[in-house]
Image (cartoon, rainbow, N blue to C red):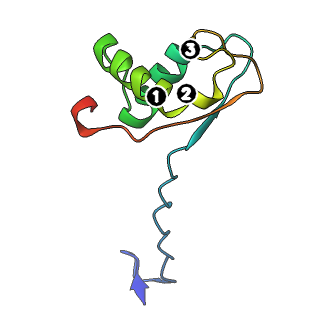
């Protein structure tokens, strides 16, 4: 039992469990105005907690395009994406963090 400084008993307080870590998303649903550069930049920023450099975004974009080559509407043209498309997000290599 806990005791307050005035001597009155106080019920023990329950400890709150730390919130569980939210797993990183594994795919991205394209919305109007999205492009794969934005997907790469936003994914890196969310996972790192800060904006990524252009070099890191470009490197991650290459991984993103490689992983989703079969999902591109026009093969070899990653700049052409449409709302409703889903793209798998590759893991971020340690070199980009």
* Quarter of the view holding residue 61: top left
**Which of 32/10 is in front?**
32
Q: In the rendering, at what x and y percent does residue 12 appear?
A: 48, 82
In the image shown, does 19 or 89 lie closer to the viewer?
Answer: 89
Q: Secondary structure at mark 3?
A: loop
Q: Residue at x 31, y 20 (%)?
A: 56
User: Separation of disc 2 and disc 1 at Cα?
Assistant: 5 Å
Whether the residues at callouts 2 and 1 have beta carbons within 8 Å, the answer is: yes
Q: Residue at x 49, y 34 (%)?
A: 67
- In this rendering, which labeled residue sits more in front, label 3 or label 2? 2
Most extreme residue toward the front is 75
**Where is mark 1, residue-wise?**
66
Can you name the residue that lies furthest to the bottom here? 1
The residue beneath circle 3 is 78
- Which sits earlier in the primary sequence, circle 3 or circle 1? 1
Which residue is identified by label 2?
69
Judge left or right: residue 41 versus residue 5.
Answer: right
Question: Along the polypeptide, which appears first: circle 3 or circle 2?
Answer: 2
Q: Position of residue 1 (x, y in %)?
A: 43, 90
């Amino acid at each position: 039992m806990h005791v307050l400084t005035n001597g009155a008993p106080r019920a023990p307080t329950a400890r709150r469990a730390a919130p569980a870590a939210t797993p990183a998303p594994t795919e991205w649903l394209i919305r109007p105005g999205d492009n794969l550069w934005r997907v790469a930049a936003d994914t890196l920023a969310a996972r790192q907690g800060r904006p990524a450099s252009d070099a890191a975004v470009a490197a991650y974009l290459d991984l993103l395009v490689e992983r989703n080559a079969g999902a591109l509407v026009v093969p070899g043209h990653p700049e052409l994406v449409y709302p409703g498309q889903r793209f798998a997000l590759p893991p971020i290599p340690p070199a980009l963090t």
